[in-house]
Image: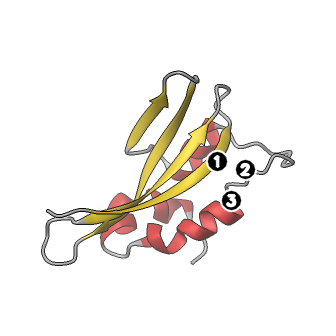
Amino acid sequence: MEFNSKKWQSYEQGIYNENYRKKMVFDLVYNHLDTRMNNQNKIDIKEIKKLLGFPIRIDTLTHYGKFYFVYEVEEKNEYNIDPNGGMNLELHFDQDSILTYWKINEFWFKP
């Protein structure tokens, strides 16, 4: 599914009902978040917030002056209403607030 900023930013539709985020995440990272070194159009934190809205978490790498945003992509509920896993998108920034790389984490746990 092609990335759509409005559908991504709608948390309820993005995570639960239609699960738009999971359907769009690969188009987002491969076609909208170019982090190659030779890319002349660097993406900064303001553009990310405009494109994706605010993250669910901001973490820092304290010794390096770098930080990353975490966006929830999917909440997994296999057996009941309690979540037992999920998928997150991490966007890592340098000290100048330029996107340097992204990472998708899928995880499972026992409720």
Q: Nearer the viewer, mark 2 or mark 3?
A: 2
Label 1 is placed on what type of residue? Answer: Tyr
In the rendered view, how is the structure colored? Answer: secondary structure
CB-based contact (under 8 Å), mark 1 and mark 2: yes
Residue type indicated by callout 3: His
Alpha-carbon neighbours of circle 2 within 10 Å: few (<14), some, or many (≥20)? some
Q: Residue at x 84, y 49 (%)?
A: 39
The answer to whether 50 is drawn above or below residue 7 in the figure is: above
Distance, label 1 to label 2, CA atoms, is 6 Å
- The quarter of the picture where the C terminus appears is bottom left
Residue with the mark numbered 1: 101
For label 1, count other residues whose C-alpha is less than 10 Å away and answer few (under 14), some (14-19) or many (20+).
some
Q: Quadrant of residue 44?
A: top right
Please provide percent x and percent y for residue 12. Answer: 32, 63
Q: What residue sits 15% from the left and 78% below the top?
A: 79
Q: Tell me the CA gap for discs 2 and 3.
A: 9 Å
- Left or right, 109 with respect to 13, comes to left
Q: Which mark is residue 32?
A: 3
Task: Identify the residue shown where x is 76% and y is 42%.
Answer: 42
Mark 3 residue element: loop
